Amino acid sequence: MTRRAWARHRAPLRPETGRLAPPKCEARARKQAGYSLLEVLIAIAILALAISMSIPSMAALLERHQARQAFAAVNVWLTDQRTLARTSGAMMTWAEGASPARAVDLPQGWSAQFLGPARIYPSGACAPMRIQILSPRQRVWERVVAPDQCRITYRVESG
């Protein structure tokens, strides 16, 4: 007996069409379209797990972005002070621990201070100096101010 003949032998015929009736499991599958509650809960749990794993990396990404903003703001301030020193012909000085944060547009909660005395000469050159920038999470970035350009060379790495 062939496979087709065996299927006809086992499956009942529909009286109205004379064709084979689909198996009961196919008829049940057509009636029950959609997802079960368990499937939905598992999908939500997987999604929540993925989101919770990405939150720490997003916070670190935001902190690095704000650190770049802080360094750029300090560079703008240093350029302004250098221009002021050149136009006035006076040396600009700051004591160790002095903070340019009042004059600098740092992100909220961030601070900056000089590590050691800082000077900008009337020629526009800077004495070797270091600047420390502190994040609200107490992460510290220290960078050297390039004496020839009077700018902070910075690169904010992850980690």
Image (spheres, grey):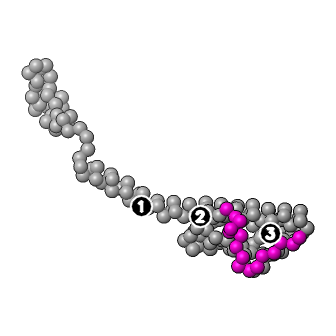
* SS state under label 1: helix
Task: Name the mark on residue 52.
Answer: 1
Residue 87 in percent (x, y) is at 89, 62
Q: Is residue 97 left or right of residue 40?
A: right
- Looking at the rendered structure, the kind of residue marked 3 is Ala
Q: Residue 146 carries which label?
A: 3
Query: Which residue is drawn at the image coordinates 71% and 65% (left, top)?
Result: 103
Instruction: Say which amino acid is labelled 1.
Output: Ser
Q: Nearer the viewer, residue 146 or 11?
A: 146
Start and end of the magenta stretch?
Answer: 90-105
- Name the disc covering residue 86, or none: none
Kindly state the secondary structure of the residue where label 2 is placed: loop
With 27 as the anchor, is 126 left or right in this view?
Answer: right
* Few, some or many residues within 10 Å of mark 1 (<14, 14–19, 20+): few
Earlier sequence position, callout 2 versus callout 1: 1
Please determine whether, in this image, residue 44 is positioned above or below residue 83.
above
Question: Marks 2/3: CA distance?
Answer: 26 Å
